[in-house]
Amino acid sequence: MPRKPQSTDGDYGSYDLCASQTVTCTVTWKAGSSICRGSTSTCTTLYQGKHASLDEAKDYCEMAYGVGKSSEAQSCGSCEWGTGSRSSDCKEACKEKCDRIHDRCHEDCNKYDRTQSCRKKCNDEYSSCLRDCDRKC
């Protein structure tokens, strides 16, 4: 997908809507803003829309939230193609894999080695697998 708009005459209505795809951008809000509920640190939310380029999405996000115009929004950035759910889908699939391995391990303990150490080994491997999911995704 292109980073630049399909049309560059500066008019938001001139982009090729047929080329639009879902983009997700991170909106950073100023500390003390109502969105951050008065917190002393910044906070973030997600903006999502259909755009012809990542640059167009960022520009539109900044315009929509009034970035730089005494708004509570500080910036729009980290724009990516898609819904932003890729990492949660990855974690979900990875954790399901860990669950299956953990269940099989306990089944094997029940069949072949009914000791507490076998079950502990299963639980340790499960914890390690879940940590790997957090690292990978």
Image (tube, rainbow, N blue to C red):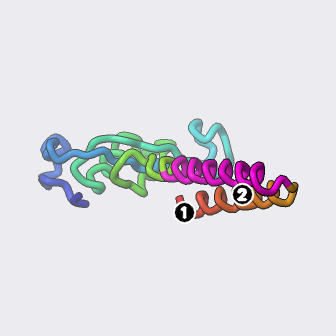
Q: Position of residue 120 (x, y in %)?
A: 82, 57
Most distant residue in the right direction: 116
The tag earlier along the polypeptide, 2 or 1, is 2
79 and 37: which one is in front? 79
Q: Residue at x 17, y 51 (%)?
A: 10
Please name the predominant secondary structure of the magenta segment in the image.
helix
**Which residue is labeled 2 in the image?**
127
Whether residue 111 is in magenta: the answer is yes
Labels 2, 1: front one? 2
Is 11 on the left-hand or right-hand side of 65? Answer: left
For label 2, count other residues whose C-alpha is less than 10 Å away and answer few (under 14), some (14-19) or many (20+): some
Describe the element under mark 2 as helix, strand or loop: helix
> Could you tell me the amino acid type at mark 1?
Lys
Q: Residue at x 31, y 44 (%)?
A: 22
For label 1, count other residues whose C-alpha is less than 10 Å away and answer few (under 14), some (14-19) or many (20+): few
**Which residue is labeled 1 in the image?**
136
Q: Position of residue 65 (x, y in %)?
A: 41, 41
Q: Total number of numbered labels?
A: 2
What's drawn in magenta, residue-wise? 90-114
Q: Position of residue 52 (x, y in %)?
A: 21, 49
Q: Is residue 9 above or below residue 48?
A: below
Is 63 on the left-hand or right-hand side of 132? Answer: left
Is 67 on the left-hand or right-hand side of 34? Answer: left
* Residue 4, image quadrant: bottom left
46 and 130: which one is in front? 130
Is 126 on the left-hand or right-hand side of 43? Answer: right
* Residue 77, image quadrant: bottom left
Describe the element under mark 1 as helix, strand or loop: helix
Q: Residue at x 63, y 54 (%)?
A: 101
Whether residue 104 is in magenta: the answer is yes
96 and 1: which one is in front? 96
Q: Residue at x 69, y 62 (%)?
A: 128
